[in-house]
Amino acid sequence: MTSTMNLFQLPALGAALEGGVFAGLTTDKEGWHFAVALLPDKPEKLLTWKKAIAWAEGIGATLPTRPVAAMLFANAKDQFEVDPSWHWTSEALDGSYAWRQNFNYGGQYGIHKSYEGRARAVRLIQLTV
């Protein structure tokens, strides 16, 4: 379940928030606004896309969407390993491919879901006014 907080309670970027660090704001397709907390947890090994999704769910979080991953590159790049430089997003490109975020130079590309890569999880906190 997504927690909620008042917009005026937000900390500064990079400050502690809900077990992670505040990395910015996002809006979903329905128009709801969320604070994004990048969690410190990291899988012990590289994972396929499906295993990365399951890992994030197992810690009560989610992989970032493509827009959130781009925001993480902009606001929290120093929190990511760069070897390999890419991390999974939560979004499939098609039946065989999913999107990845490169944390060296910011690009997003499709890669086969069976490849193994890094993963980081985020927690979304719904904002109220």
Image (tube, rainbow, N blue to C red):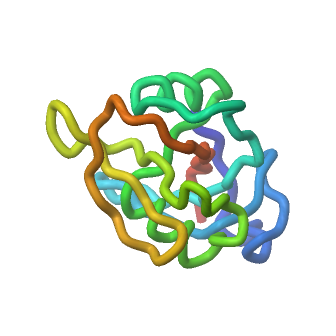
Q: Position of residue 19 (x, y in %)?
A: 81, 45
Locate residue 88 relative to residue 122 in the image: left or right: left
Locate residue 39 relative to residue 16 in the image: left or right: left
Q: Residue furthest front?
A: 83
Query: Which of these two is toward me, 26 or 114?
Result: 114
Query: Which of these two is toward me, 129 or 90?
Result: 90
Q: Residue furthest left?
A: 94
Q: Position of residue 22 (x, y in %)?
A: 71, 64
120 up-or-down from 59: above or below: below
116 up-or-down from 39: above or below: above
Q: Position of residue 96 (x, y in %)?
A: 19, 33
Query: Which of these two is toward me, 114 or 49?
Result: 114
Which quarter of the picture shows residue 29? bottom left
Query: Which of these two is toward me, 72 or 109?
Result: 109
Q: Position of residue 65 (x, y in %)?
A: 40, 52
Which quarter of the picture shows residue 45? top right
Numbered circles on residues, count: 0
- Residue at point 78%, 56% (across, down): 17
The C terminus, quarter of image: bottom right
The N terminus, quarter of image: top right
- Residue at point 71%, 31% (across, down): 44
- Residue at point 15%, 31% (across, down): 95
- Residue at point 62%, 21% (across, down): 58
